[in-house]
Image: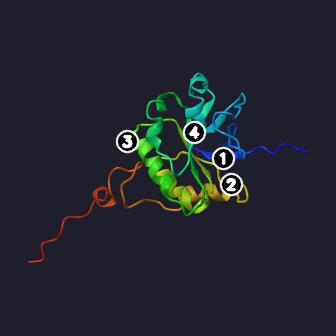
Amino acid sequence: MRDIMREIIKDKAIVADDWNVVKLAEGETPEDVKIEGGKQIVPLKVWQAQYAALKLRTDIGVWIASDERPEELKDDLASLPLVAVDFPSFADGRGYSIAFNLRARLNFTGELRAIGDVLRDQLFYMQRVGFNAFATRPDRSIQDALKGLTDFSDAYQTSWDQKTPLFRRSSRPAAQDTK
């Protein structure tokens, strides 16, 4: 059996994914799960339970569930190379707020990856709130998903990626005096 190379979208390009997302098996506790060597993205609860050992490693990222708070990582963000946010369903929008808070309020500058039920239609909006990496669903075309980052040429609203609304960025001719 061949090992299939996983790919993600990172910084608007398709690249090989050399990180492994750790999920707890049924009945496994955060304290008991064994974290192997190599690049591992561990659940926030595992990070907290095994903090003393994991904080010493440079090949550990943390993923946040949609019902968890990014502030739990505020003291560790400078040393984490990657934070992922899990989307358990494409309809669950809590991950957008988590990403925005990581970038805008907690000043996270590393890789911010969307994982879980990530679809093409979400990518443009996800990058607006700070995501720069996307692990799209494996049953969908990653080449097609990449096009989702450029579905729109501009955005009206402010967000992480654009601090000024469109009406303030547009230049309009002065009103003509019609007297």
Q: Disc 2 versus disc 3: distance between alpha carbons?
A: 31 Å
The relative height of residue 39 versus residue 87 in the rendered view (above or below) is above
> Which residue reaches farthest top?
56
Q: Amino acid at mark 2?
A: Ile
Circle 4 SS class? helix
Q: Position of residue 34 (x, y in %)?
A: 71, 32
Q: Earlier in the sequence, mark 3 or mark 4?
A: 4
The colour mode here is rainbow
> Which residue reaches farthest right?
1
- For label 1, the residue is 8
The relative height of residue 10 versus residue 145 in the rendered view (above or below) is above
- For label 4, the residue is 45
Circle 3 SS class? helix
Nearer the observer: mark 1 or 3; the answer is 3
- For label 3, the residue is 105
> Which residue reaches farthest left?
179
Q: Nearer the viewer, residue 158 or 63?
A: 63
- For label 2, the residue is 142
Q: Earlier in the sequence, mark 1 or mark 2?
A: 1
| CB under 8 Å between discs 1 and 2 | yes
Nearer the observer: mark 1 or 4; the answer is 4
Residue density around tag 2, few if under 14, some if 14–19, many if 20 or more, within 10 Å: many
Q: Earlier in the sequence, mark 2 or mark 3?
A: 3
